[in-house]
Amino acid sequence: MAEKTNSFERFWKELKRRRVFGVVTTYLATAYIIIEVTNNLSTPLHLTELFSTLELLILALGLPFVVILSWIFDLTPFGIMKTGSPDGSEKSEIQPKPVTKRLRPSYILNAVLIVIVIILAYPKIFKRNTLENLRSSGEKIYVAVMPFQNLTGDTIWNIWQTGIQNELTTFLTNSEELKVRQTELVNKLIQVKGFANFASITPSFAGTISQQIDATVFVYGTIKKAGSIVRVNAQLIDSKSEDSYTSFQIDGTEENILHITDSLALLVENSLVISKLMNKLPLYQRHRPTTASSEAYRYFLYGEKAQSSRDYPTAKKMFLQALAIDSNFVFAALSLSYVCMNEGSYEEGRSWSDKVYKKREQMPTWMKILTDQNHADFYETPLEVIKYLRQYLEIDDHFPGTYYNIGLSYSKLDQYDKAIPEYEKSMKLYDQFGTKPWWIFNYTLLGEAYHETGQYKKEKKLYKKADRDFPDDPGIIWYKTVLSLTEGDTVTANNYIEKYKTLRRDRSWTEAGIAYSIGEIYNKAGYLDKAEKYHRLELSFEPEDPYRMWDLALFLIDRDRNIDEGMELVNKALELKPDTYWFLDTKGWGLYKQGKYNEALKLLERSRDLCPFYRHQVYLHLEAAKKAAAGMKSN
């Protein structure tokens, strides 16, 4: 074993002494440069595929000869000389004088060749020229349409090889998002390469042609026929990687071939434009939409942007527009359902959820899970919602919104200790993607969870980061005010409150709305006298509004400030808005605190039945009343 090792070491040293590695490196670099130059000149010089093949074969066969010659001979300052043996036994008759060590010409040659290779190879390695990366740049997508291959076995269909190609090219040229290479250029290159039969064009060859004319993606299709049925297939293929990222299939008859072509063109255009829109999004949002309409998808993205900014009316309008274009756009319908919830239109939100749920059997697994989750938001408890969300994690565990929604579900159950790690996972993923969170609630709900568990230092640190991502956001100011009051820093809190008022007025909030929100700041921080002051101020601004009556009533009853007055207010609110589940819950809670447990139980059960989704507060009130009523019976 030792002898084999020593033999290998001697052989390795001899390779280095004879400079075989240097010569081979020079040869390979030169060969690469020759190949690249030939590729760039093949079109203007009308070189065929055969020339490129022979060139590659000759260069490959030359490598062994170069290795042998480099072993036998060496390039010295005195010319090419036979390499002597390592022990010096084979000495040349001429003994040259020692030469001072200087930079060898071979070193300079290799350095120059390496620089040239890097220049030629860099764009191929690092250039953002895959279809996905190019679209993310916001530039137009460059497309080449190949002749469709006639696989019908009937030469009468040969005319449609370029016929469909022409129709598709003409249609796609009208798109503002695409730059389509003209048919004449594509077919001229194919002819120059010696392909007279379009059926022999391979995806690899089509990719080469596309790269020569700077087309990032090409359309590669076939025509088939069985009986009276004509089938046209097409694929969108990345010119460089040759990966097919989507395909289409349309069936029809010979008489409606133009209709087939128009339908195919529309599918291709929508797919390309949708992909471009997708790649303008952060990585975590680049999921394939459930629509084939680029316009519907565009309105959907407008809605998503508005929703993330809490502009719910605009978001609702955009989602409805997307659904008007494509009524089967499931993701838009689910998003619309949540927007309705966020703006308080719960019944409308549940209605959209029901519509989507009826279609769940036709959905892929991932969409079915999200539909089940949405349905559970209205008809089940947060625990069932969490179950569906964890199922979705098995499909995609890198979407921050899933962890956020799990945390939100735990927050709805007041289980903040369980919510925190889920929120934190969501925030960590946003950091990994190098983007800020989708909306402000990623910060405020985690901050609230820290607050409820007494982790004030973490809460304060979180809000500093939130200020960088969402500067002067009223939601962050609200929670920072609560934190300052909790820590006893009333000076800072007062400054925050003044700033909060200004920000809300700038957003056209009413004075009653501002007073309510400040009252809730003091309520959450435990400053009950201040909280009552602002809730009374709220009602004074809009004294006939039943919701303002209810706000003050809930505070007075829940905080045991003045239950009788609270009951008067909630009764008046119910006269104006009967069967409002919030009002019924508050009145039931007031009856419970007055010791009228059976009456409370009936109202709280009715409130639960009318509630369009699970509310933990209603559940807790109802459970307390059940327990108290049961205790009365046992006595």
Image (tube, rainbow, N blue to C red):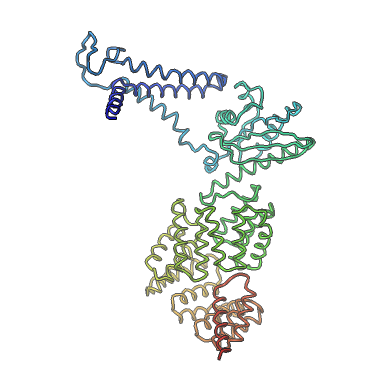
Quadrant housing the C terminus: bottom right
Give residue 163's position: percent from left, percent from top.
Answer: 72, 31
Residue 543, located in which quarter of the rendered image? Answer: bottom right
Q: Residue furthest front?
A: 1
Question: Is residue 312 positioned above or below 523 on the image?
Answer: above
596 or 212: nearer the eye?
596
Q: Residue furthest bottom?
A: 635
Give residue 334's position: percent from left, percent from top.
Answer: 62, 59
Residue 541, located in which quarter of the rendered image? Answer: bottom right
Residue 591, can we see it? no
Quadrant housing the N terminus: top left
108 or 541: nearer the eye?
108
Residue at (49, 75) in percent of width and height: 520
Residue 507, located in which quarter of the rendered image? Answer: bottom right
Give residue 298's position: percent from left, percent from top.
Answer: 61, 50
Q: Residue furthest left?
A: 97
Question: Is residue 124 positioned above or below 319 on the image?
Answer: above
Is residue 168 found left or right of 618 in the rendered image? right
490 or 230: nearer the eye?
230
Residue 596, can we see it? yes
Q: Residue furthest top?
A: 93
Question: Is residue 305 positioned above or below 99 on the image?
Answer: below
Number of numbered markers: 0
Give residue 580's position: percent from left, percent from top.
Answer: 64, 76
Residue at (62, 73) in percent of width and height: 611
